[in-house]
Amino acid sequence: MSQQLDQVSLAAMSLTPDERAELAERIWESVTADEQAAIEQAWCEEVDGRITTADERGTPGIPAEQVLSEVEADLRKRRG
């Protein structure tokens, strides 16, 4: 990471969660439509590859309700 990126990241972490979300949205909007499409395509390919790998290995899925419950429990712990 560049020094400038480190400084911006550190400053961003001092923002409230809402402000960080707004900053992320502004940064995403600064990316051109072609760049956004390429990024989204790369994510889709990554997801498809992971699904294929899981299917080939016979990896069982985890129900969404269980995943969400575990995430919520973890967030509650972190918030104290």
Image: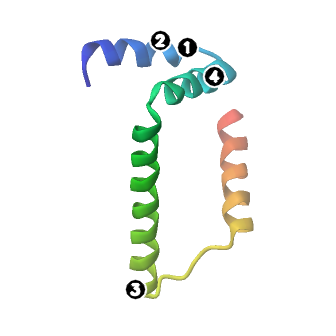
Residue 31, position as x, y percentages in the image: 44, 30
- Report the quarter where the C terminus lies: top right
Identified at 45% across, 46% down, the residue is 37
Residue 22: numbered disc = 4
**Which of pointers 3 and 4 indicates the residue nearer the eye?**
4
State yes or no: discs 3 and 1 in contact (Cβ < 8 Å). no
Instruction: Give the mark, 1 or 4, whose residue is nearer the N terminus.
Output: 1
Q: Quadrant of residue 9?
A: top left
Measure the alpha-carbon separation of dots 2 and 1. 5 Å
Return the disc, 3 or 2, that comes first in the chain's sequence.
2
- Secondary structure at badge 4 equals helix
Left or right side of 2 for 75:
right
Lower position in the chain sequence, tag 3 or tag 1: 1
Instruction: Inspect the image, locate mark 4, and give the three-letter code of the amino acid beneath it.
Output: Glu
Q: Look at label 2 and name its amino acid.
A: Ala
Please indicate whether residue 13 sits to the left or right of residue 7 in the image: right
- Image quarter where the N terminus lies is top left
Callout 2: helix, strand or loop?
Answer: helix
In the picture of the structure, the residue carrying the numbered disc 3 is 57
Q: Secondary structure at mark 1?
A: loop
Question: Which of the two discs, 4 and 2, sits closer to the camera?
Answer: 4
Mark earlier in primary sequence (3, 4): 4
Earlier residue among tags 4 and 2: 2
Near-viewer residue (47 or 29): 29
- Distance, label 3 to label 1, CA atoms, is 43 Å
Residue denoted by label 2? 11
